[in-house]
Image (spheres, rainbow, N blue to C red):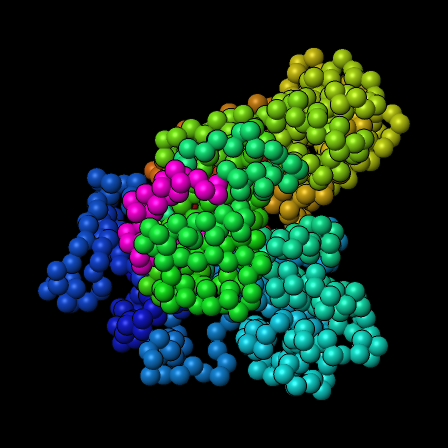
Amino acid sequence: MRVIASTYLGSSEPRALEALIELGAEVRVSYDTTSTRLHAKAWLFDRRSGFSTALIGSSNLSNTALVDGLEWNVRLSATETPAVLDTFRATFETYWESEHVESYEATRFARAVARERPERPDDPLSPFDLVPYPHQVGILERLEVERERHGRWRNLVVAATGTGKTVIAALDYRRLRAASQRDMSLLFIAHRREILEQSRRVFREALKDGAFGETYVDGRRPTEWRHVFASVQSLKTLDLADLAPNHFDMVIVDEFHHAAAPTYARLLNHLRPKVLLGLTATPERADGLSVTDWFDGRFAAEIRLWDAIEGAQLCPFQYFGVHDDVDLSAIEWTRGGYAAAELENVYTGNDARLAKVLRSIREIVADPLRMRALGFCVSVAHADYMARRFNEAGIPSAAVSGQTRSADRETALRRLAMGEINCLFAVDLFNEGVDVPSIDTVLFLRPTESATVFLQQLGRGLRRADGKACLTVLDFIGQQRREFRFDRRLRALLGSGTRAEITRTVEDGFPLLPAGCHVQLDRVAQAVVLDNLRRTIGGRWGELVTELRDVGDVSLGEYLRRADRDVEELYRSGRGWSVLRRDAGFATPELGSDDARLGRALGRMLHIDDPERLEGLRRTLAADEPPQATMLGERDRRLLTMLHFDLWGTDPSLRNLDAGARRLWENPARLLELGELVDVLDDRASVVPRQLRLTQPIPLAVHCRYTRDEALAAVGASRAEAPRPLREGVLWDQQSGCDLFFVTINKSERHYSPTTMYRDHAISRSLFHWESQSTTTERSPTGQRYINHRARGSHVLLFARAVIGEPFVFLGTVQYRGHQGERPMAITWELDDSLPETVYAMTRVAAA
């Protein structure tokens, strides 16, 4: 018997749990009541007869609920709904193995329950470990990539308010301090005393040190100057001549968007810490000044909207895309988007559009006179016009902008929070100065192409607040110019996806959303968005050519950076960089006879992120002559075989490594292009690989990505002269003593069927549930090899991908832990290397 309980609301009785333990139950507890708030009421009864049942509903485990109360439950049977019970079981396992669900301990449980009851004050220092949420783990892992993989020690983290930026900073400092094995000096900078004191509290919790840190604010001065939490106003009075530039090992700046101000710039120009970490929700300032100059123009990491909502750090949203009957196709387009003056002329005074906005609000918002709405406008005149007409329509409103006096802006925000006005129309504020958690409605009244600005504006309404169930979003969509990119804002809204994937998501009605979220486009708005997406899929070669001419004769990496393009966009047509340079009129080496074929091949290599492979390619391409397989060691020969399959596949006319290499050297344009592509792939790599701990010369790195052909070549199971086709997802290679498992997590044709999500999935970051082929039994040679692989000296290598068509992530070697059933065998494997958050998110069961 296994039971998961919760301290939520302080209602679980310790006596009841201890009675269960006396009966032989193993009890684990969810102590997280701030975000997860586990309140599940469900039971699964496994029966050896096969007639297992589940009860899911509203009942607590109490006599009143189960016997006397009028409750609402559903009873499910394994004989009638086996898929639901399998998903139930898989979801339970993910909860059971979660780091937020811990073994029951009487004293800790009693203390946690007491804290949920208002009559018991909190202890001075929590006895619980500070455990990051999944989205915070992802940020910490990304920072590790930036530092360990790319050598970038100045990093900016973009995260919406309420997503735990300070927790990320504290855990990042704790990890760096542990890695350095010494006490790192620290300077934490913020602009308010309350933030500094709260941040110091978080650091003390993370480090389990109630005396950590001194404050430098409101006249208080540090005495040790070792770990300082300082306000920028206090630092302004400091004589920098008395502070050595390298005095602090790590400097953390909260709300880094203020760093463009002279007060911050003076300090940051002086300090030279080993580690600089910036935290902000607003990387784009209203005054146009950039804060990314301190970080080589890049963000290190960004908390995805999806992750924060799924982690309950932000509230869910209901998004409605409404066509507003406005045609913007003739509006002037500049490099920054639409000309603001022309947009103002179109929107200001447009009573027909205003009527549609008002009608949509009355149809979608339950009671406009109870809403707290923020509307984003194109100009001051537009905001004033909207506020005036809303007031005339009986919806109390006001307008603010960067030109509004600070006192008047604070008054308007206070009136909105108090419900004295129902809508505040803003211009050029984005996140600056607008912090009202009770905002429950956001109106997008101008086209916003920038994903960052879109998220900033959306984020103003995503703060959690008492009595606020969700955020209502009304996005008024007109006919756009060809240059406008809907994919950017939809990718920000959906969290990820290529243009083709986003197009399919729009076509299918946004089927996969976080709990409580909803996205709906009206018929005309959907047609406008889909038309825009379809026109931009493939990159419109002529636009890319014009874009490169505008950028100039630069490298591939520089072009992608200046044009704000993904490398996938360039290769989607199959033509690639060499052809783009030639069509733009820039000098290009001779295009060989295999040019078109190699252009398509390079487009299939964009997944490569293994540093050994990338460095091996650099060495190979730097040589004046093609490599000869007979002159290479076994590991390098396998690397060359992986490249061979990437370029030439299993072409029977090229079953020779030397011949394949010579053909590449006969195409000098693609040879040069491949070298530039390697630099781009290395620069964007987002994983710190783990070493494969096997004695064989297998050039695979744990958590890097490979195609099936590449993996087989790396193991030695497939050679150019003897390619080994593989139709099934399993392979036993006797020569290397390795079982290779290739898992596709979502096996449904359209990627959305819930009945197939549970069969192969991660239970936790260290456990994986996998099902064998349908004919495998426990006593079969294959089944026995799986069970006894350690005793027999064989190894199991696990690869996984989300959907068909993607490369596989190598999850590393795994160890047999147990199994259930046969034909197929449901085996639990323990991974030798725990999964990073991004991979875990891909492989865990969807129902969780």
Instruction: Report if residue 461 is visible in the image.
Output: no
Q: Toward which corner of the image does residue 71 lie, by quadrant? A: bottom left
- The location of residue 281, given as percent across then percent down, is 57, 58
Instruction: Report if residue 450 is visible in the image.
Output: yes
Q: Report whether 717 appears left or right of 56.
A: right
At 51% across and 66% down in the image, what residue appears? 408
Q: Toward which corner of the image does residue 236 lie, by quadrant? A: bottom right
- The location of residue 274, given as percent across then percent down, is 76, 64
Magenta span: 347-376
Give the residue furthest to the right.
624
At 45% across and 42% down in the image, what residue appears? 349
Q: Report whether 460 appears left or right of 172.
A: left
Q: Toward which corner of the image does residue 821 lie, by quadrant? A: top left
Q: Which of 719 and 161 is in front in this view?
A: 161
Count of numbered labels shown in the rendering: 0
Q: In this view, does 724 lie above or below 171?
A: above
Q: Report whether 129 appears left or right of 275.
A: left
At 52% across and 32% down in the image, what residue appears? 328
Q: Which of 306 and 731 is in front in this view?
A: 306
- The location of residue 837, given as percent across then percent down, is 54, 52
At 22% across and 64% down in the image, what residue appears? 61
Q: Is residue 130 above or below residue 554?
A: below
Q: Which of 556 and 661 is in front in this view?
A: 556
- The location of residue 194, given as percent across then percent down, is 55, 76
State yes or no: residue 274 in magenta: no
- Locate the N terminus by quadrant: bottom left
Q: Which of 828 and 400 is in front in this view?
A: 400
